[in-house]
């Protein structure tokens, strides 16, 4: 079956797109990307993109920071994506991956070349992990800081840091890693934000602790405040607070809301998914298909 992608302003067959071995994105990681989900509702046959405009606004911010401006507004990118999803005729939950990158082929890792390219591809994606809950370790790798490679830009090259942390975790028999900042505070997972629940408060690290300001994180904070009436606090979290937390969970587009049940061989709470995480996860999954009128504007029907 033909897979269509959006490349340089047009929807084309994926087979028509190729990248040079000299391309700067390939040689130096000069690019940034987004990850967006679309949820398929079997009952109505509708596919809903989730908070797509906010993802594209974040992509355009990344482009500005990295000197990779592309000639589209967030609304235009949303329209192009809807058209692409329709063209592919997806009837299943789908992951959308826009990538902006430096296509130029001269030898040096410079950002000033104007050869900025945009590629959007999609693929079916249900659950990202077979596991319902994670056993994790604190990584020996530290999270890259904002003054090294800005995490808020979702930089292609920066994901080597995520990959090393995940590799270490998997090689040591864990499901996922938690990275600390250079100052030793809790930062995030390789591709997820983190929350702890403690003393009746939901706590998550602030943007100044080098996190990616996740769109799922934003949704979780809204659900916790508005639907569960919880106090949500953004503050630095010390490593040992992870060991004494009643609950820990991750949030992210791919992993959605996933509980952490063990950290560095210590049980989190009673070693099972906590009640707060469970409620937030239920609410989150409930609002991804436009079924909760309060949050219906987050979901855009494709067909
Ligand atoms: C490093 C990192 N942190 C957090 C997240 C979660 O962000 P979001 O909820 O916008 O997917 C991601 C995923 O994109 C990520 O790559």
Image: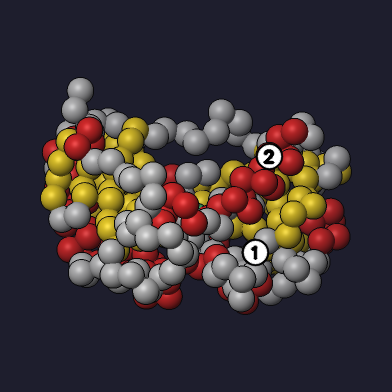
Name above or below for residue 52 compared with residue 122: below
* Residue 117 position within the rendered picture, expressed as x and y whole percent measured from the top left: 28, 58
Q: Secondary structure at mark 2?
A: helix
Horizontal and vertical percent position of residue 279: 56, 48
Q: Nearer the viewer, residue 98 or 265?
A: 98
Report which quarter residue 174 is drawn in: top right
Would you call the spot at circle 1 few (<14 residues within 10 Å), some (14-19), or many (20 or more)? many
Mark 2 lies on residue: 167
As drawn, is 286 to the left or to the right of 256? left
Query: Which residue appears at 48% of the width and 60% of the height?
Result: 155
Q: Nearer the viewer, residue 225 or 116?
A: 116
| Residue ID at (22%, 60%) | 77
Secondary structure beneath disc 1?
loop
Check the picture and name the quadrant holding the N terminus: top left
Q: Residue at x 78, y 71 (%)?
A: 183
Residue 238 picture location, percent across and down: 80, 66
């Amino acid at each position: 079956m033909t897979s269509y992608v959006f490349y340089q302003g047009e929807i084309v067959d994926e087979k028509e797109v190729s990248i040079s071995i000299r391309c700067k994105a390939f040689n130096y990681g000069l690019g940034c990307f987004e990850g967006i989900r679309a949820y398929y509702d079997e009952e109505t046959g509708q596919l809903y993109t989730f908070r797509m405009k906010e993802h594209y606004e974040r992509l355009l911010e990344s482009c500005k920071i990295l000197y990779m401006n592309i000639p589209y507004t967030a609304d235009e990118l949303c329209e192009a994506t809807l058209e692409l999803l329709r063209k592919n005729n997806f009837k299943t939950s789908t992951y959308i991956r826009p990538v902006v990158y430096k296509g130029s082929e001269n030898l040096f890792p410079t950002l000033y070349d104007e050869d900025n390219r945009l590629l959007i591809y999609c693929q079916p994606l249900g659950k990202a992990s077979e596991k319902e809950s994670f056993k994790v370790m604190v990584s020996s790798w530290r999270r890259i800081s904002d003054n090294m490679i800005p995490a808020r830009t979702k930089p292609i090259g920066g994901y080597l840091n995520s990959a090393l942390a995940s590799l270490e975790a998997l090689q040591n028999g864990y499901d996922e890693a938690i990275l600390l900042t250079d100052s030793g505070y809790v930062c995030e997972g390789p591709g997820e934000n983190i929350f702890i629940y403690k003393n009746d408060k939901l706590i998550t690290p602030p943007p100044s602790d080098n996190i990616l300001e996740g769109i799922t994180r934003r949704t979780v904070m809204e659900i916790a405040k508005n639907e569960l009436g919880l106090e949500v606090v953004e503050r630095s979290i010390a490593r040992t607070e992870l060991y004494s937390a009643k609950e820990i969970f991750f949030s992210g587009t791919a992993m959605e809301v996933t509980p952490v049940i063990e950290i560095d061989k210590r049980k989190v709470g009673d070693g099972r998914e906590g009640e707060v995480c469970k409620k937030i996860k239920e609410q989150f999954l409930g609002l991804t298909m436009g079924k909760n009128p309060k949050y219906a504007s987050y979901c855009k029907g494709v067909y």
